[in-house]
Image (cartoon, grey):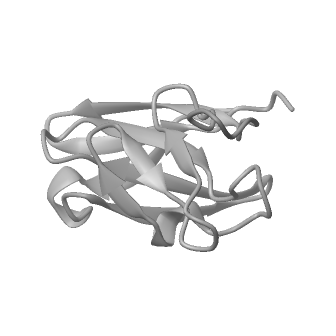
Amino acid sequence: MSWIEVGELAEIPRLGARVVRTAGGNIAVFRTATDAVFALDDKCPHKGGPLSQGIVFENRVACPLHNWVIDLQEGCAVGPDTGCTRKHEVKVEAGKVFLLPSTAA
């Protein structure tokens, strides 16, 4: 896999996400209030809810279906819930966001 240009950092809303469609499925690219950027499969480990539509706070996102809280750095649910979604590498260079989709299951 190679890096995919997602777009300008400013195009991703603060405390929001942008969805990138790939052959391996949809990936949500999140931007926090401090402009940190993270990427996870756009699928909650609980019931597959679209994490990109959840509420972002600190370095976490709350799934819009059942309010599971997912850590954006690790892709794992915050206790007492358990389960993880796949994370992907992201980088910001000269104000542009790049995504490296993971091929690991």
Residue 46 image-quadrant placement? bottom right
Name the residue at 70% across, 41% down. Answer: 85
**How far across and how far down the image is residue 87, in percent?**
61, 34
From the viewer's side, name the closer residue of 71 and 31: 71
Q: Quadrant of the C terminus?
A: top right
Relative placement, left or right, of 55 versus 103 is: left
Q: Is residue 26 above or below residue 104?
A: below
Name the residue at 77% across, 63% down. Answer: 48
Relative placement, left or right, of 33 versus 48 is: left
Q: Quadrant of the N terminus?
A: top right
Relative placement, left or right, of 31 versus 74 is: left
Residue 17 image-quadrant placement? bottom left
Name the residue at 64% across, 36% down. Answer: 80
Relative placement, left or right, of 93 versus 48 is: left
**How far across and how far down the image is residue 88, in percent?**
58, 33
Residue 76 image-quadrant placement? top right
**How far across and how far down the image is residue 57, in percent?**
28, 50
From the viewer's side, name the closer residue of 60 and 1: 60
Farthest residue, direction front = 80
